[in-house]
Amino acid sequence: MISATMPRNRPKVVVIVPAAGAGKRLGGSVKKQFLELRDRPILVHTLQRFEHCPDVDEIAIAVPEQSIAEMETLVSRYRIHKVSKITVGGERRQDSVYNVLKRLPLRQSDIVLVHDGVRPFVDSKRVSQLVRACKVYNAAVLAVQPKDTIRRSAGGEFFDQTLDRNALWLIQTPQAFKASLLLKAFERARRDRFYSTDETALVERLGVKARIVEGSYDNIKITTPEDLELGKLILERWRTRGLL
């Protein structure tokens, strides 16, 4: 929902956090976003990054319906005051983001960031850079270049091409968009029954290119048991350096 009458002098920055996934690759009965990373759930670490980011005004979350009460308890316990909405997620990530987006009172010039609930190591400096880029280019995305040589295999048995890694980027989140653009992109995708794994692909279908903002190799997505172990090491390093 886009509102044209909100009396603010600057665009509002809202972060949508889709956290309705099952997390099957991590195994166990606890959904991955609620798994403990040292002393608190992964999702809480993620939300706290934005709670302490001066460029972020509000946070809206999509979780499974049966997890709403738990989410409300966590938000209260850890004093995450910027959370303004907790919504039921959809069948897929794209559905979850749209469920939140269409319920937010936004002006056309407001900025919406979409961030994975299980990426707990995004820093305020890069969020600020992303917001600034979005104000100029209407869409911006964090990304890093691969460190390893990348080869393609069409059949899965032999390599047939070495790709130029200088032209390749590993996409991260947050991804940032002007509110009017993102809503239009979701409505077009819904009409066309088009699904993608990220929001940048949706706005590209409207002919809009996202500005690349260099991300951090620490900004990992915790998906596997190995990621969880790596996350513990990153967390300890951040705490030692006073980054938390």
Image (spheres, grey):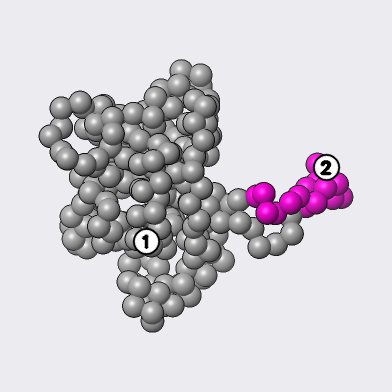
x and y percentages locating residue 155 in the rendered image: 83, 42
**Residue with the most extreme top position:** 191
Vertical position of residue 240 compared to residue 221: above or below: below
Secondary structure state at the residue bearing disc 2: loop
Residue at the location (38% across, 66% down)? 36
Indicate whether residue 162 is drawn in magenta: yes
Secondary structure state at the residue bearing disc 1: helix
Q: Which mark is residue 155?
A: 2
State the quadrant of the C terminus.
Answer: bottom left
Residues rendered magenta in the picture: 151-168
- In front: label 2 or label 1: 1
Along the viewing direction, whichever of 215 and 83 lies nearer the viewer: 215
Query: Amino acid under label 2?
Result: Gly
Query: Amino acid under label 1?
Result: Lys
Which of the 4 quarters of the picture holds residue 187?
Answer: top left
**How would you rate the neighbour count of disc 1 (Cα within 10 Å): few for under 14, some for 14-19, many for 20 or more?**
few
Q: Which mark is residue 239?
A: none
Residue at the location (27% across, 53% down)? 55
x and y percentages locating residue 184 in the rendered image: 39, 24
Q: Is residue 202 left or right of residue 38?
A: right
x and y percentages locating residue 113 in the rendered image: 36, 44
Indicate whether residue 200 is drawn in magenta: no
x and y percentages locating residue 130 in the rendered image: 40, 50
State the quadrant of the N terminus.
Answer: top left
Along the viewing direction, whichever of 127 and 101 lies nearer the viewer: 127
Q: Is residue 195 left or right of residue 4?
A: right
